Image (tube, rainbow, N blue to C red):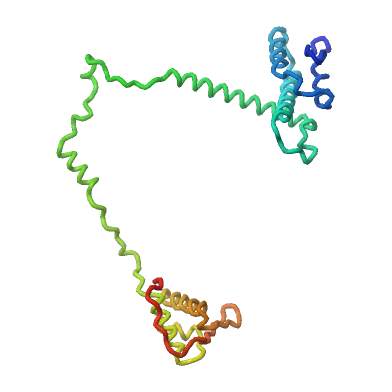
Amino acid sequence: MTPSIEFAVELPLFSGPFRLLAEMILDQRMDVCDIPVARITDRFLREGLERIEGWPLEEATWFVAISTVLLELKVGRLLPRPAATVEEELLGGAQPDLIYARSLELGAFREVAGWVSERLAAASRMVPRTAGPPSQFAHLYPDVMEKVTPELLRAVAAEVLAPAKDIDLSHVTPIRVSLAEALMAVQERLAGRSEARFRELIEGCRERIEVVVRFLALLELHREGKVELIQAKVFGDINVRWQGSTEVETPRREGVEA
């Protein structure tokens, strides 16, 4: 752009090229709060439309980008924000490509805002129809209650108000082993000896769930301090040593069934 068509501003505190004003603001030689960015933007647009050639794309892009930075600086001065900890967070040190990217984002937001505004304006002219058809056209509309009969209403009510069907649980395997029974069995086998292996305590168990419940019973006895568990190696035999009394105690029936 030649100097003859360079954009200039006339402000109470500054008169001259806008590029020089922007450099002074970024160099913190002038307070951005004293600059009316909106007034400058209106003048830029007005002069660009009045001139036949308008503003070149490079000049217009630079103006939008630098105006975005000035607005961000002004907002930062007016609103409280945490202090910048690194140099990149300072707005005055923003890179040109970052400024240009922000200008593109601003343009996209404005385009979407215009589209939403048009849709809202169109929707504001729409009102729901609350009145029925005119009497002379009433015969053209089908009667929605024509096929509704008392027998149909009775059938629908019987289906809706009928009690819920029983859930079929035949595919679920019933659990017949309880933790209380497993505690009794483990204590009975340990009553006559002071030590036994876990394999010996699960002899006679036919199903996997019985083995699991026996192991849970063993953990419960260990928690109560009645047995001591010893395992020499990983996946090795578990030796169970009885620490309780020699009398077999009847476990409480409120135990959770497995």
Residue 138 falls left or right of residue 99: left
Residue at point 23% right, 47% down?
Answer: 161
**Image quadrant where residue 86 sits:** top right
Q: Give percent across and percent down for residue 179.
A: 41, 75
The answer to whether residue 217 is visible is yes
Give the quadrant of the C terminus.
bottom left
- Which of the two residues, 191 or 202, is positioned nearer the viewer here? 191
Q: Give percent across and percent down for residue 48.
A: 71, 11
Residue at point 49% right, 19% down?
Answer: 121
Give the quadrant of the N terminus.
top right
Above or below, 83 relative to 68: below
The answer to whether residue 258 is visible is no
- Which of the two residues, 205 or 226, is positioned nearer the viewer here? 226
- Which of the two residues, 9 or 81, is positioned nearer the viewer here? 81
Q: Give percent across and percent down for residue 29.
A: 84, 24
Residue at point 30% right, 19% down?
Answer: 131
Above or below, 146 relative to 189: above
Residue 47 falls left or right of residue 27: left
**Image quadrant where residue 189 sits:** bottom left
Q: Give percent across and percent down for residue 74.
A: 73, 26
Numbered label tally: 0
